[in-house]
Image: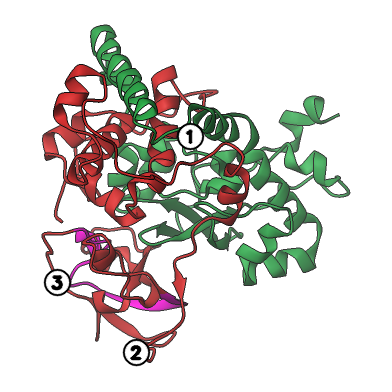
Amino acid sequence: MHDKHDHGSHLTEIELRVRTLESLLVKKGYVDPKALDVLIDTYETKVGPRNGAKVIAKAWSDPDYKARLLKDATAAIAEHGFTGRQGEHMVAVENTDVVHNLVVCTLCSCYPWPVLGLPPVWYKSAPYRSRVVMDPRSVLADFGVTLPADKEIRVWDSTAEIRYLVLPVRPTGTEGWSEEQLAALITRDSMIGTGLAKSPTKTTVEVL
Amino acid sequence: MNGAQDLGGVMGFGPVVAEKEEPVFHAAWERRAFALTLAMGAPGGWNLDQSRGARENLHPAEYLAKSYYEIWIAGLLRLMAERGLIAPDEIAAGEPLHLPKPAPRVLTAQSIPALLAKGASTLRPAVTQQRFHLGQRVRARNIHPYGHTRLPRYVRARVGTITHVHGTHVFPDCNAAGRGEDPQWLYTVRFPARELWGEAADPTVTVSIDAWESYLEPQ
C-alpha cells in the first residue's frame, strides 16, 4: 500500500495511535525502547542493497564464487557475513542473454532482507503484486525497461520462505573493473529484476 | 483465505509508481510500527504464519485502503488482543489497567544483532518420503481454505513442472492455525503464463511459486 492515500489528519491519527501503543507496551514491560532503536537503526543504516551489490560484484568477478552462488546461494551469501532474518533460504537466479528473472511476493511482501534491506513501497503495493505475474512486460515498461520480445521472462512468486536474488547481466565495457567499481553499477532494482545494471558510460564519473 | 492479500491477477490498480531516492521509512511512526511488530514477536509468542494470517484477516476494503505499516499495526493489535496481552480499555486509556502477561520474553537491544543474523530457518528434518521429483508435472489443487494458506488463487487447478526441491519446511496452513509445524516437502513449481492466464498470455513468460506437497497432486 502507498502513503499517497494518506492525508494530514489521518497521519496524525496513526502517529498518535502508534505512540500510545509503544508507551503502553513499554509500561506493561513487553518492550524495551532501546531494542526498538537498534531494530530501526539496523534496517535504516546498516542493512541494504549495498550488501547485495557486493555479492553480485563478486559473482561477476569470480567464476568459482558465481558457481557457488547459483548452487547454494545461502552459503555463498553467508561468506560475506550476510545471513539471517528473511534470508534464511536464498536462491540466486541468473539473467542471461536469453532469460530475464523478476521477483515478487503476490501474497504479502517477502523480500531478501540481508542482501536488499527492507522492500520499497512499490514492491509491497497492489499494482506490482497484482500485475507482474500476469503481464511482466507491462510492469517492466513502468520502470522504463524494454526487453527483446523473444526473451524468456521468469517470474518468481515468493510464496514460501525461499528468498530470491536476481544475478543481473554484467554490463559490457567493464572488463578489468574492480569489485568496488562493479558494485556501483548494481542497483536494487537490478537485483529484483525490475531494472538492469547501470551502463558504465553513465557512471564513469562517480566510479572514478 | 481468499482475501484481499491474494493479489496475483487482480486488475485495476494502475501503474507501478517507483519513488526516486526512496527512504527506508516515510515517517517516524513507520519506524516505530516496524520495530514494535518485530519486538513483540518474542513476548507475544506468535509465529510468522500467525502474523501473516492476522494481517490478511482485515476486511478486504480495509486491507486495500490501509498503508503497509497501518496493516502491520492492525495485525499486531489483533495478535495481542487474541492473546489477552492488552485490553481494549488500555488502548483507549493509553495506560496499563490490567496485569501484564507474567515474565514475558522481552527483546533486549544487546541480543538483536545475533538474533537477526541467526534468523529462523523453516527447514526441518524429513519425516515423510518425497512424493514428487524434479521435472515432474503436477497440478496445484483446487482448494479454498478459510484459514491462512500460501497457495495463491491464480495457480489453483493449473499444471506446472517441479524445478526445485527444497527439503521439508514448516507448513504455514497448519502453523498459522496453532496446530503445530507439520513439516512438508517444499517444491518450486513453474507454470507457463498461458496455462495460468489463457492463450492471449505472453508465450515467453513463466511464473514459479513455492508449493508445499499437500498443495499439489500428480498430473
User: Disc 1, disc 3: CB below 8 Å?
Assistant: no
Q: Is residue A103 above or below residue A181?
A: below
The percent coordinates of residue B214 (x first, y second) are 25, 78
Q: Is residue A109 visible?
A: no
Q: Is residue B27 above or below residue B43?
A: above
Q: Is residue A63 above or below residue B136?
A: above
Secondary structure at badge 1 equals: loop
Question: Which residue occupies the extreme right position in the image?
Answer: A176
Task: Tell me if B68 is positioned left or right of B11 in this view.
Answer: right
Disc 1 chain ID = A
Please identify which colour was used for chain B in the image.
red
Q: At label 2, which amino acid type do we have? A: Arg
Q: Which residue is mark 1?
A: A144
The percent coordinates of residue B15 (x first, y second) are 32, 32
First of labels 2, 3 by sequence position:
2
The foreground one among A75 and A38 is A38
Disc 3 chain ID = B
Q: Nearer the viewer, mark 2 or mark 1?
A: 2
Which quarter of the image is occupied by the C terminus of chain B? bottom left
Circle 3: is it few (<14), some (14-19), or many (20+) Cα within 10 Å?
A: some
Label number found at residue B142? 3
Q: Residue at x 38, y 38 (%)?
A: B37
Task: Tell me if B137 is positioned left or right of A50 in this view.
Answer: left
Q: At label 3, which amino acid type do we have? A: Asn
The percent coordinates of residue B210 (x first, y second) are 37, 67
Q: Is residue A104 magenta?
A: no
User: Disc 2, disc 3: CB below 8 Å?
Assistant: no
Q: Which residue is mark 2?
A: B131
Secondary structure at badge 3 equals: loop
Which quarter of the image is occupied by the N terminus of chain B? bottom left
In the figure, the green chain has which letter?
A
